[in-house]
Amino acid sequence: MKYSDHWRGTSATIVPVEGSYVWGAIWRIHNKDMPALDRQEGVDTNWYFPKTVEIITLEGSKVQCRTYQQTINPPVCKEDEELPLERRPSTTYLDCIINGAIECKLPEDYIEKLKKILHNGNEASPKMIEQLNSL
């Protein structure tokens, strides 16, 4: 798990747990744009690595998709266990995740689960907030 100075908290990652799942959106991009996405996700700085995963769509079809996972995986927390303070995202980062889930129309029960994630009480850096406000 890694702390982001821009977000002022830890960033999200996939923590592999047998029998668990993560909801998300599938975005189609051109192969020529993959290097830029890799840079944005920190592949060049060894923050995340690209990973191909098999996705099951709502219609039941299987699709190979690219996702990103942190190079340093945190230990697994039990479902009813609170995240330790050093693993919590900032309020700004958590809001981005929740708002993205709402925009992508992910299931309401999953959104409610995201809303229960504890944050660290920090806001992102002024530069990051400025970038978010310009979107």
Image (spheres, rainbow, N blue to C red):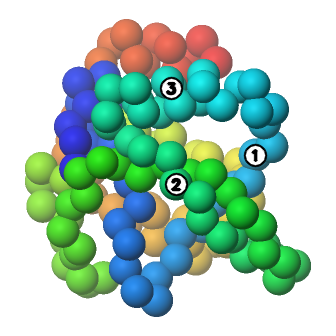
The amino acid beneath tag 3 is: Gln
What residue sits right under mark 3 in the picture? 40
Considering every residue shown, the one lying at the far bottom of the view is 19
Front-most of residues 99 and 63: 63
Marks 1 and 2: which is nearer the front?
A: 2
What residue sits right under mark 2 in the picture? 51
What residue sits right under mark 1 in the picture? 27
The amino acid beneath tag 2 is: Lys
Marks 2 and 3: which is nearer the front?
A: 2
Residue 20 x, y percent position in the rendering: 46, 82
Mark 1 or mark 2: which comes first in sequence? 1
* Crowd rating for badge 2 (residues with CA inside 10 Å; few <14, some 14–19, many 20+): few
Residue 100 x, y percent position in the rendering: 61, 46
At horizontal 21% and vertical 61% (from top left) the residue drawn is: 74
Q: Please determine whether, in this image, residue 53 is positioned above or below residue 30.
A: below
Dot 3 falls on a residue whose secondary structure is helix
Q: Are marks 2 and 3 in contact (CB under 8 Å)?
A: no
At horizontal 77% and vertical 67% (from top left) the residue drawn is: 63
- Judge from the rendering whether residue 17 lies leftward or rightward of residue 56; answer left or right: left
Dot 1 falls on a residue whose secondary structure is loop
Q: Please determine whether, in this image, residue 80 is positioned above or below residue 69.
A: below
The amino acid beneath tag 1 is: Trp
Return the mark for residue 42. none
